[in-house]
Amino acid sequence: MNKKWSKTNPRILSLISSLEEASRSNEARIWREIARRLQAPSNNHAEVNVSKINRYASEGETILVPGKVLGSGVLESAVTVAALDFSRSAADKIQQAKGTCITIEQLLQDNPKGSRVRILR
């Protein structure tokens, strides 16, 4: 007997449907890609350290992590980071660097076209 697995977290289910709707209505393929990545099993979601954000992001850039941001490393530039979740130390380090931590839902509301957003995995 095969058991079919499905997502049970209502926040992720709602986010996936919102991303797919935004992708259709705004013709923004970025939201379809993020929805696809979030539909994968949660142990396949991205886990990005602050050091990786520091390596690939420039000042004032918007970074999207379809998973969790972890606190290992140092952030030297002020960036906006949107993610599914943040560790406490990661949020502190981003805010100490004059950056901003927001949810993917907030990014979707602020930037429905998904322009000028860099995805890190």
Image: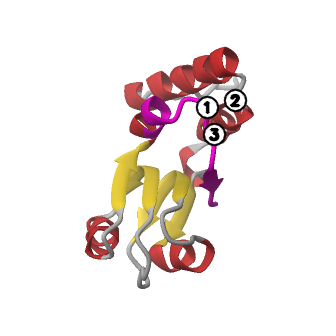
At numbered mark 1, what does the secondary structure look like: helix, strand or loop?
loop
Residue 88, disc: none
Q: From the viewer's side, name the closer residue of 2 and 63.
A: 63
Q: Which residue is mark 1?
A: 113
Q: From the viewer's side, name the closer residue of 74 and 69.
A: 74
Residue 76 on the magenta span: no
Give the mark nearer the N terminus: 1 vs 3.
3
Give the mark nearer the N terminus: 2 vs 3.
2
Which residue appears at 69% of the width and 31% of the height? 32
Q: Is residue 117 above or below residue 60?
A: above
Amino acid type, residue under disc 3 in the picture: Ile
The residue range painted magenta reads 107-121
Comparing labels 2 and 3, the label whose residue is closer to the camera: 2
Amino acid type, residue under disc 1 in the picture: Lys
Quadrant into which the C terminus falls: bottom right
Which residue appears at 42% of the width and 82% of the height? 76
Residue 120 on the magenta span: yes
At numbered mark 2, what does the secondary structure look like: helix, strand or loop?
loop
Q: Which residue is mark 3?
A: 34
Amino acid type, residue under disc 2 in the picture: Ala
